[in-house]
Image (cartoon, grey):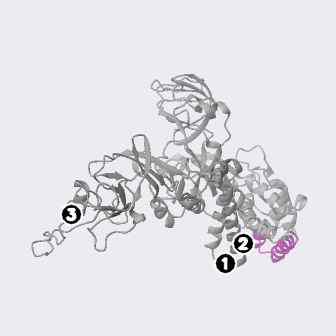
């Protein structure tokens, strides 16, 4: 879609062959435009929920909320969180999702999930390359009730991983799905996947009162968390194992990048094979909106008021139609 | 709680204890109550939204506590021997007592609460009845007050017709089949039925957390029937409610939330209140479980001649 958007933008901008937009500038505007539209989805979603409650929204093909949810859900990620530290003070603190730790940064932390039942914990004592095994000579996996399908949480190089138990080979060996266990020792924990509880987000203003309340104090059945700048602290403090906390979040869209091949004396040629290539992540139906947004920025860049006015007019028209 | 198969029900999968699931189908767990409420009654298109789960948890627990105090018939029973001070320490989950009985010679004898006190706090005093203080200005107290000592040592007399009765051992005259005594001015006619009980008596000292029993009897084993608040000593996973009250507890939570919210129309609050009240009435009727089979034995007494 990104090449199509660029071609349209250039076509509108083109006036006596001076309406050129460099790829670098285009990519900057793409990022701005996509972020703007992405955030707008959440406000639209709220707006349409209110309209549903006012009985001014339909069902079936008229179910606008469903369409908005579909778009937002394409940005959903469920990932284990990394323990902030093994120190007692920060044991129950988990680092919030980042591109480094979880492959994507979070826009909205929708919910946190906690494994209630820990079957086993320990540290691997050796490893077997290519065997995908958790090997711990001190473990008693069968006695502890570890079953195929259980979840194993661990962290390698500061990157958290949760994987599934494929089979319990022996008291000291588990066959798992993931293939990155190529070192030892690794701290791990095994969880019952059926006892996953949702932790409730609590504000900093309430958490102390909540933790002191005899009726509502966070427990493993009703865990809670607070959010700090880089981490979240989970209550009760008995939640502190690696992989015990999962986050379901809406990530930011990846930065769009129109990649190209340099040519001498002519326009750059679109190169979809470039490793840095990244298309827009919004649906195809957003192409006109993206064009309008980018045109506004580009119009200002080349000081062409007509372009800005045209783009703003188109955007206003679109807003009228969809509201 | 998920449905379980019959093997799990009867044997708890050979786990310990194996009776853990017996009768569990009568109950809905707190976890289910909170989960169902958040899922069904809270949301963008529901009457209540933007709720914190801990609010629902709080109201659910409060509702269960209230039900345990009177509507539910979840009576707990504890049998303990008395200590040398004729005391029975209240159980850790005690809220109020229902009945206290003595277990003697294989017979359960319901006891009467003493209408007079049998315990007191005391301060130390000198010969002129001045209070004595320590260096910090606090008044000094003896371990036991005189009334406590009298009860423990068996020195106190009782207005009840037991072995410590003030009338016990007194002589009288029998005239034409009626007994007369001369130890009260005007003699004693008739009987004070309120205190006409020969069993030992008791007082509940709620603040001290004990039940004080009168001495002078061979009573040692006491059976306490009491109600708790259903919180299972803070173990959320064990808190449950009879299914007959399930719909009521949802209505109670809904009403409690609407009632405390700003900007909710009064008719909405009233509707929730009426809903709650009628569901409580229904649940109580269901739980009372009145049917001919239960009434049969009681009704057999209707033909008895009363002299």
Mark 3, chain letter?
B
Q: Residue B176 location, x and y as percent? A: 37, 62
Q: Nearer the viewer, residue B285 or A177?
A: B285
Residue extending farthest to the right is: A61
**Residue A180 in the figure: left or right of residue A13:** left
The residue that mark 1 highlights is B263
**Residue A78 in the figure: left or right of residue B58:** right
Pick whichever of labels 1 and 2 is earlier in the sequence: 1
Residue extending farthest to the left is: B127
Q: Residue A286 location, x and y as percent? A: 82, 60
The residue that mark 2 highlights is B271
Q: Which residues are magenta?
A: A295-320
Q: Is residue A219 magenta?
A: no
Q: Nearer the viewer, residue B221 or B89?
A: B221
Q: Quadrant of residue B111?
A: bottom left
Task: Identify the secondary structure beneath mark 3.
Answer: helix
Task: Identify the secondary structure beneath mark 1.
Answer: loop
Discs 1 and 3 carry the same chain letter: yes
Look at 18% across and 62% down and name the residue there: B142
Q: Is residue A316 magenta?
A: yes
B147 in relation to B265, above or below = above
């Amino acid at each position: 879609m990104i090449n199509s958007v660029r071609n349209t933008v250039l076509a509108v901008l083109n006036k006596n062959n001076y309406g050129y937009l460099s790829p670098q500038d285009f990519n900057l505007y793409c990022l701005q435009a996509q972020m703007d539209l992405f955030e707008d989805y959440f406000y639209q979603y709220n707006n349409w929920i209110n309209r549903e409650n006012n009985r001014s929204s339909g069902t079936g093909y008229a179910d606008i909320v469903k369409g908005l949810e579909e778009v937002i859900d394409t940005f959903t990620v469920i990932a284990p969180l990394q323990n902030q530290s093994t120190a007692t003070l920060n044991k129950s603190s988990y680092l919030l999702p980042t591109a480094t730790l979880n492959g994507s940064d979070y826009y909205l932390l929708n919910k946190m999930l906690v494994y209630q039942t820990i079957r086993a914990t320990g540290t691997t004592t050796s490893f077997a390359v290519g065997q995908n095994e958790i090997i711990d000579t001190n473990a008693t996996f069968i006695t502890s009730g570890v079953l195929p399908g259980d979840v194993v949480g661990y962290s390698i190089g500061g990157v958290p991983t949760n994987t599934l138990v494929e089979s319990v080979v022996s008291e000291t060996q588990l066959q798992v799905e993931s293939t990155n266990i190529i070192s030892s020792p690794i701290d791990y924990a095994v969880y019952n996947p059926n006892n996953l509880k949702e932790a409730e987000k609590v504000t900093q203003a309430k958490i102390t009162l909540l933790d002191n309340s005899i009726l509502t104090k966070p427990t493993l059945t009703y865990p809670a968390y607070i959010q700090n700048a880089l981490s979240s602290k989970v209550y009760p403090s008995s939640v502190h194992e690696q992989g015990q906390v999962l986050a379901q979040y809406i990530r930011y869209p990846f930065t769009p990048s129109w990649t190209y091949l340099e040519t001498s004396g002519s326009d750059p040629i679109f190169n979809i094979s470039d490793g840095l290539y990244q298309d827009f992540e919004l649906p195809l139906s957003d192409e006109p909106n993206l064009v309008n947004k980018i045109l506004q920025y580009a119009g200002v860049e080349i000081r062409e008021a007509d372009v800005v006015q045209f783009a703003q007019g188109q955007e206003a028209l679109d807003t009228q139609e969809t509201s | 709680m998920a449905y379980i198969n019959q093997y799990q029900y009867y044997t708890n999968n050979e786990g310990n204890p194996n009776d853990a699931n017996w009768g569990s189908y009568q109950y809905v767990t707190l976890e289910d109550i909170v989960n169902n409420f958040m899922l069904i009654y809270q949301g963008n298109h529901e009457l209540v939204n933007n709720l914190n789960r801990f609010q629902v948890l709080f109201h659910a627990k409060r509702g269960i506590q209230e039900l345990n105090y009177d509507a539910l018939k979840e009576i707990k029973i504890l049998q303990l021997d008395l200590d040398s001070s004729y005391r029975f320490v209240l159980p850790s989950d005690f809220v109020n007592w229902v009945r206290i009985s003595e277990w003697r010679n294989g017979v359960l004898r319901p006891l009467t609460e003493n209408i007079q006190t049998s315990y007191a706090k005391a301060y130390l005093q000198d010969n002129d009845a001045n209070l004595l203080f320590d260096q910090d200005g606090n008044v000094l107290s003896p371990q036991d007050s005189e009334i406590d000592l009298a009860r423990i040592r068996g020195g106190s007399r009782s207005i009840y017709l037991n072995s410590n009765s003030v009338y016990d051992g007194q002589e009288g005259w029998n005239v034409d089949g009626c007994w007369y005594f001369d130890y009260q001015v005007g003699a004693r006619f008739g009987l004070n039925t309120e205190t006409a009980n020969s069993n030992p008596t008791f007082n509940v000292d709620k603040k001290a957390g004990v039940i004080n029993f009168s001495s002078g009897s061979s009573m040692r084993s006491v059976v306490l029937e009491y109600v708790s608040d259903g919180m299972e000593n803070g173990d959320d996973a064990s808190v449950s409610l009879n299914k007959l009250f399930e719909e009521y507890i949802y209505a109670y939570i809904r009403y409690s939330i609407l009632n405390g919210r700003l900007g909710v129309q009064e008719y909405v609050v009233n509707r929730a209140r009426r809903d709650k009240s009628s569901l409580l009435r229904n649940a109580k009727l269901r739980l009372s479980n009145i049917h001919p089979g239960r009434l049969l034995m009681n009704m057999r007494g209707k033909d008895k001649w009363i002299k």
